[in-house]
Amino acid sequence: MSGDALLWLSFVLIGLATTLPRASFIVLGGRVRLPSVVQRALRYAPAAALAAIVAPDVLVVGGDFMPLNPRLAGVIAAVAAALLWRNPWLPFIAGMVVLLGLKRLLGA
């Protein structure tokens, strides 16, 4: 098999591997019921995906793991503001004030 054909075959197989599981929920619809354990686990999927996206950006600075940095302090301030008050804008404001204040203070 030539290199081009192998490449296209891998594209098709990867496409099927990603499309079929997603399409199965649409095609099967309500005919198949997921076990309750799986349903409970899927409730945490959005939060886990968001944490997987945000955590590296917060904890890695310049390619190095830095657990104590202004970004983390800004995230902590934003989460605290979100938990304490129900104002949708306050977490953004609190996080940015802490982030920019610490950056200016530390000269970063």
Image (cartoon, rainbow, N blue to C red):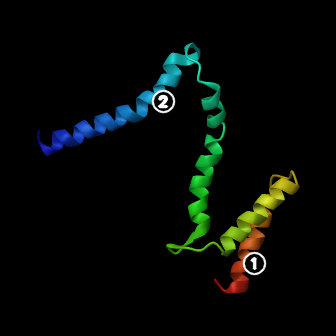
Q: Position of residue 72 (x, y in %)?
A: 68, 68
69 with respect to 89 (left or right): left
Query: Which residue shows up at 76% across the image and 72% down it?
Result: 98
- The residue sitting at 66% across, 33% down in the picture is 40
Where 14 sits versus 82, above or below? above
Q: Is residue 82 above or below residue 104?
A: above
Residue marked by disc 1: 101
Q: Residues within 10 Å of mark 2 (few under 14, many from 20)?
A: few
Q: Position of residue 94 (x, y in %)?
A: 80, 65
Q: Is residue 41 left or right of residue 23?
A: right
Residue 22: which numbered mark, if any? 2
- Residue 69 can be seen in this image: yes
Q: Please state which of the two labelled residues, at mark 1 or mark 2, is closer to the viewer.
A: 2
Asked whether the viewer can see residue 90, the reply is no
Q: CA distance from mark 1 to mark 2?
A: 44 Å
Pick the quarter of the image with the C terminus. bottom right
| Direction from residue 46 to residue 73 in the image, left or right | right
Return the disc, 1 or 2, that comes first in the chain's sequence: 2
In the image, 48 versus 107, the foreground residue is: 48
Figure quadrant of the N terminus: top left
Residue drawn at 72 percent across, 70 percent down: 73
Residue that sits furthest to the top in the current view: 31
Using a 10 Å C-alpha cutoff, classify the residue at mark 1 as few (fewer than 14 neighbours), some (14 to 19) or many (20 or more). Answer: some
Q: Residue at x 38, y 34 (%)?
A: 17
> Quick one: 72 or 39, which is closer to the camera?
39
Vertical placement of 3 versus 84: above or below?
above
